[in-house]
Every structure is written in C-alpha cells, then in structure tokens.
Image (tube, rainbow, N blue to C red):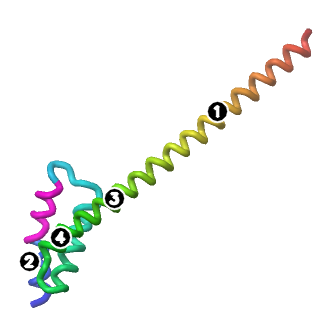
Amino acid sequence: MNTKLIAASLMLSLPLAFASAGASAKPGCLKGAAAGAVGGHFLGKHHVLGAAVGCAVGHHMGKKQERRDAQAQAQANANAQAQANANAQAQANARNQQADGRR
C-alpha cells in the first residue's frame, strides 16, 4: 500500500516540478522536488508542498555549486595564464642571455 502511495505522490508532484522548472530545468530543482515530495508524503501527505520546497532548496544548492565551479574554473585559468607568462618570461631571458653571449 505504501509503495503505491509513494508512486502516486511522485507521479502527482513531478509534473508540478516540471511546470515550475520552465522550459529548461533549473539546477537541482528536479532532484529536490523528488526528495521533497517523498519527505512531504511521509510527514503527513504534504507531497506537493514538499516538492515545491524541495525544488526551491535544490535550486539554491545547485546555484551555489555552479558558483563554486565557476570560481574554481576561473582560478584554474588564472593559474594557467600565470604559468604561461612565467614560461614566456623565462624563454625571453634565455634568448637575451644567448644574444649577450654572442656579442
């Protein structure tokens, strides 16, 4: 009986999550909605409210993860650029030393 209720609550709440997600699924919304629907179901048949809150929390956590990933990518790019600049400077110094040795 419980598995039928869980399946029914998910089937009723997932279209709500898709509708609130719009054309493109927001990061974390669908996972949060599914978890919220199940949690809400077990807390007193509040699966729709649980799906809505789960979507909001999942979206918030997804945006935080996107920001962290973007910051890490920017840091990696800055490190790569600094290394490339250091390599270019070292090569220029080596060329200058060779040119000075020929004179």
Residue 60 x %, y %: 31, 60
- Give the mark, 3 or 4, whose residue is nearer the N terminus: 4
Residue at the outermost bottom position: 1
Task: Count residues near mark 1 (Cα–Cα under 10 Å), then give few for <14, some for 14-19, many for 20+.
Answer: few
Residues tagged 3 and 4 counted as in contact (Cβ below 8 A): no
- Give the mark, 3 or 2, whose residue is nearer the N terminus: 2
User: What distance separates the C-alpha of mark 2 from that of mark 4?
Assistant: 13 Å
Q: Amino acid at mark 2?
A: Ala
- Residue linked to disc 2: 8
Residues tagged 3 and 2 counted as in contact (Cβ below 8 A): no
Q: Quadrant of the N terminus?
A: bottom left
- Residue linked to disc 3: 62
- Please tell me which residue is depicted at 26% across the width and 66% down the height of the picture: 31
Residues tagged 3 and 1 counted as in contact (Cβ below 8 A): no
Segment colored magenta: 12-21
Task: Count residues near mark 3 (Cα–Cα under 10 Å), then give few for <14, some for 14-19, many for 20+.
Answer: some
- Tell me the tag on residue 84: 1
Question: Can you tell which of label 4 and label 1 is closer to the viewer?
Answer: 4
Q: Is residue 19 above or below residue 39?
A: above
- Give the mark, 2 or 4, whose residue is nearer the N terminus: 2
- Residue linked to disc 4: 51
Residues tagged 2 and 4 counted as in contact (Cβ below 8 A): no
